Image (cartoon, rainbow, N blue to C red):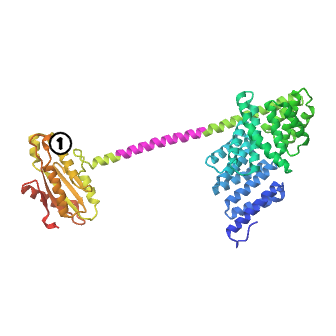
Amino acid sequence: MRAPRGVAAPERREAALALLAHLRQAFAQNRFDSAGPLVQALHAEALADGELQLAAEAALLLAKGHANREQPLPAQEWAERAIVHAQAAGVVELEASAWVLVASERARSQQPAASMQAVGHVLRLMAGVDDARAVATVFTGVTLSYQALGLDLHALEAARRALRAGLVLADESILLRLQINVVHSGLQAWDQLHEVEPAKAAALLAELRAPLDAVERTTAALHARGLPGRSSHDFLAAGWLARHGDEAAALALLQTLTTAAADLPPGLMSDAWLLLGELLRRRGEDPGAAAEAACQLVARCSDGGAAWLQRAARAEELAGRAAPALALLRRSHARQLATVRAALDERIDELAARLVELQLRDENRQLRAHNQGLEADVRHVSLLAGTDALTGLPNRRALEAAFDARGDGGQVLAVLDLDHFKSINDRFSHLVGDAVLQAAAAQMAASLRAPDLLARLGGEEFVALLDGVSLADAASVLERVRLALHGHDWAALAEGLKVTVSIGVTRVLPGEPLPPALARADALLYRAKHEGRDRVVLDPGMAG
């Protein structure tokens, strides 16, 4: 029960876990009446303490207890509580285990559609789980749910998956159960396959040989230690031998099993009597006693499910009562048809949901591509808005943005103007003039430093913004620009063409806006023009 509030929370939790383990043992010993109320109290206390995982485990234990007592409604109610708690705690494996129990109980309650929906939840939850023990436990439950629904091929696949996970566990008892489940599910699946797909049925029978041998070795070791379990192997071995065609060996095992076994569940024991009676009839012997024993056992384990209806039909037919056997067989087929439809509906719903998901993904992909296109268009338009179309240089708008974004780290501003450009247009044509602007822009940009900005203001006028440089160093850079144009071979554009540039240079004052700095540099540019062009003129008031 709950530890005193003075006890630390970890210690209270340890005490609660120890109590839960004790109550599990009590349930295993069929002491549900005495242990059940204690588990309910533990569940309530765990909720009060905010221990949602512990609450989920207690609820799931109660669900299993009610299921074992064939009380489907409280079993489902407690399983659904376990699902809610496990979801809140974020324990996927525990939630999946609760859904398995819901699936099994819904199958036993002849709710195939609801059962398949629960199985669907399990499969989706377990898709990303790689814990071997959890996978083995959950898919063993899925196997039993499929068996209750009469979906033997699905049960076999779930049993295989559980066994693959169990192979990495060093637990002999778990591995034995998983191997038994694979063989039992495989034999049931063989019954579905052998008439319609004999080659697959033969391959399946060969596959079952290895796990059957493993069951034989383990149960023989258990038998030598005086422990139960040998009957399970003998039942499975008899079923395998009968389907393999070794009827004499199967008959010998079944005759011993049906007279001596006491540890097989009634359902499997009825199957043993049924197979014994069918083998006796094939050999021309009277199956009456076996048929009567089978009918009694089938009546004892009646749950109205597909598996029970098939057993009951076989028992009535073996007893020579054809009319009730046919009626039961019809009910069985109708039940199986409903189950198959439910399975198909669940699969169709899953595929439809997947299709919607894929469609949404495709739409989102297209939307992302469209948005990326829009973003590219916006970037392109923004680039165009800040770019001079002829030279590819930044334009005045881009210059203003760059100027406004500058720090106060010592900028130098220069205005550059191509000399006698009007005469170039007049003498060589505007086409040559445009080519000169493009070539001059490229030459000047290449002669500046990497961080420097060169922009075209308009016509033949350009502006350079140099950051983090003294006026003297800026003069050296701009002299390099002047020499690049002065020394360039312009004859490729027009014979006799010569291009030079005049440059006015000033320092930008801290916090100064662009217009006054431009005006000062422009005045220095005109001074360079008056002094003979093709030169760099510095602001005399800002030397140093």
Report the residue at 62% width, 36% height from top. 348
Q: How many marks?
A: 1
Predominant SS along the magenta part: helix
Amino acid carrying label 1: it is Ala
The picture quadrant where one finds residue 252 is: top right
Q: Mark 1 falls on what kind of element? A: helix
The picture quadrant where one finds residue 180 is: top right
Could you say where residue 416 lies in the image, as x and y percent from the top left?
A: 16, 54
Residue 312 seen in the figure: yes
Mark 1 is surrounded, within 10 Å at the Cα level, by few (under 14), some (14 to 19) or many (20 or more) other residues, namely some
Residue 359 lies within the magenta run = yes
Q: Mark 1 sits on what residue?
A: 435
The picture quadrant where one finds residue 307 is: top right
Residue 147 seen in the figure: no
Could you say where residue 295 lies in the image, as x and y percent from the top left?
A: 88, 36
Left/right of residue 301 with respect to residue 45 in the rendered view: right
Residue range (magenta): 351-377
Residue 273 lies within the magenta run = no
Report the residue at 22% width, 54% height from top. 448
